[in-house]
Image (tube, rainbow, N blue to C red):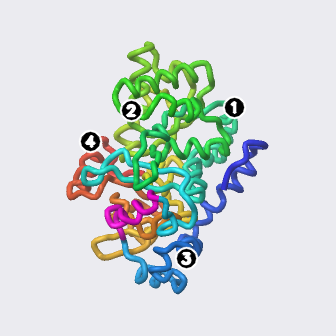
Amino acid sequence: MSIDRSPITLENLNLYLNPWRESLKDPCSSQQSVLTYLLSIYRETEYGREHHAEKVNTIDDYRHAFPIKSHEDYKSLIQKVMAGDYHVLLNEEPVGWAITRGTTKGETKFIPMTPTDLGQRVSAGRAMLNYVTTTGRIDLFDGVNLNLNFPSEVGKIKIGDREVTYGYSSGIYTKYVSTFTPIQSVPRQEEIDALGGGKTIRDWEARFELAYEKCRDLNVTLVGGVAPTALDFGRYLKRKHGKYPRDLWKTQIMTLGSVPGINTRLEPALKALYGNPRIREIYGATEGMFGQQMDEKRAWVPNYDIFFLEVETHTGVKMLHEMKPGEMGSLIASTPVLPRYKIGDVILAVKPPYFRCIGREKWWTPWRYTWDEFTTFNLGRL
């Protein structure tokens, strides 16, 4: 669902947010509806038919018919899609190919992005829109969003006779969807892409200089993107131009993702650079945007109305909304692209409907989270 830029009223923003808010009140019913919708997609794919999606009706049916799979398990199917045979896994042709910023076993992960998938990623804007509707600060839309996203085009890979262009999911999302969101992103994604897909310090400084040149005389009310990149940009401005972002703009809100601890470990540095904006965490991965911060409580709430969300805990697989406070588990997300995909993130249930991603699925992750909570004096507080 896209958001109209005109007219922008609190009433139509609330209408857009209501499905999300309602899903938080009754996640069980919402998740069943999402599963029904996803199964209608899976039935149109070879993978779905192979697993008898047409016979699946209940959550138990779904778990028996469709196995939990990692990217490594899906790799051969994804390669077939890249070679042009998209029906093996998808019900529509991909419009972009996203790569992860990290790697899996030394290899870059490729994830197809479809029109349906891209349309769902607009949910990343819910944190910002909820801020506007709860504060009444509709003047946020009088400004622009400082676009610090990664390039949507990084390189090409040859699969059989086809050459596939790939980039980062945040850049692809911005390129295809930002024109339908209620605030303009500057610089435009095409301008960022024109600088190339390099990852060196020089490449990033070129992007930062572009952002500074395009935005220095504008009213930047929103900063969105990857938290470490926002920090690097702020430090670059001080080093290169002798100014902090707070000296140039009165930013109302920062919607940031990609790392744990945005509201705890990183908050002091972000506010030192940008002034005193509200900070809202976006929780997502290359595979989708699964939740976002709703209010001043420093944790995100799930998009129960978009994705089917399970967790694998030490007692077995359960729905995300069935987790008890303090319980941890590995997230399993079903999306229009990937059924029962194991993301590899450890999720901590804080208090319904609040969750935190505390890191990747490693043995030391809970210990690192505990240490971070202790050193930031957060100690589990929302």
Amino acid marked by disc 1? Asp
Amino acid marked by disc 4? Thr
| Nearer to us: label 3 or label 1 | 3
The Cα–Cα distance between marks 1 and 4, rounded to whole angstroms, is 39 Å
The Cα–Cα distance between marks 3 and 2, rounded to whole angstroms, is 39 Å
Q: Please state the extent of the stretch shown in magenta in the rendering.
A: 69-83
Q: Quadrant of the N terminus?
A: bottom right
Query: Which secondary structure, mark 1?
Result: helix
* Lower sequence index among marks 3 and 2: 3
Amino acid marked by disc 3? Arg
- For the question of whether residue 152 can be seen, the reply is yes
Task: Identify which residue is drawn at 34% across, 26% down.
Answer: 201
On residue 43, the disc is: 3
Task: Identify which residue is drawn at 40% across, 27% down.
Answer: 203
Q: Quick one: which residue is furthest to the bottom in this view?
A: 55
* Lower sequence index among marks 3 and 1: 3
Q: Main secondary structure of the magenta part?
A: helix
On residue 198, the disc is: 2
On residue 142, the disc is: 1
Q: Position of residue 94 (x, y in %)?
A: 54, 56
Task: Identify which residue is drawn at 50% across, 79% down.
Answer: 49
